[in-house]
Image (spheres, helix red, strand yellow):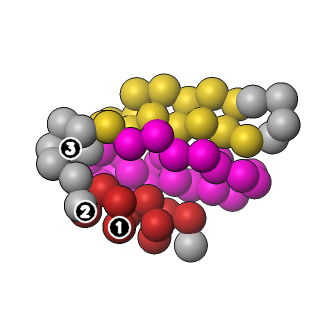
Amino acid sequence: MTFVRTRLALDRMQPGQTLLIRLRGEEPRRNVPRTAAEQGHAVLAQQELPDGITLLLLRKG
């Protein structure tokens, strides 16, 4: 479900725009960056916070 929301947000964006995503849980942390890259988007940064949240910065391809 997390990537579905990410995909909807990316679909509304222009190429080159960036999207900051907050991920919670191990599965989204593994799958969202991989799937985004497979679909032609760039993973610019990924940071794990002490509270278990992962920040992911994507650039639409």
Quadrant of the rendering where the C terminus is positioned:
top left
Residue 32 falls left or right of residue 47:
left
Please name the residue that numbered disc 3 is placed on: 61
- Circle 3 packing at 10 Å, graded few (<14), some (14-19), many (20+), is some
In three-dimensional space, the C-alpha distance between marks 2 and 1, rounded to whole angstroms, equals 5 Å
Residue 12 falls left or right of residue 48:
left
Q: Reading the chain from its start, which is encountered first: label 2 or label 3?
A: 2
Helix, strand or loop under label 1: helix
Please name the residue that numbered disc 1 is placed on: 8
- Circle 2 packing at 10 Å, graded few (<14), some (14-19), many (20+), is few
Residue type, mark 1 in image = Leu
Helix, strand or loop under label 3: loop
Please name the residue that numbered disc 2 is placed on: 11
Residue type, mark 3 in image = Gly
Helix, strand or loop under label 2: helix
Residue 49 falls left or right of residue 45:
right
Quadrant of the rendering where the N terminus is positioned:
bottom right
Residue type, mark 2 in image = Asp
Residue 33 in the image: state x and y as whole percent. 49, 45
What residue is at 72 percent from the left and 52 percent from the top? Answer: 24
Q: Which residues are magenta?
A: 19-41
- The reply to whether discs 2 and 1 touch (Cβ–Cβ < 8 Å) is yes
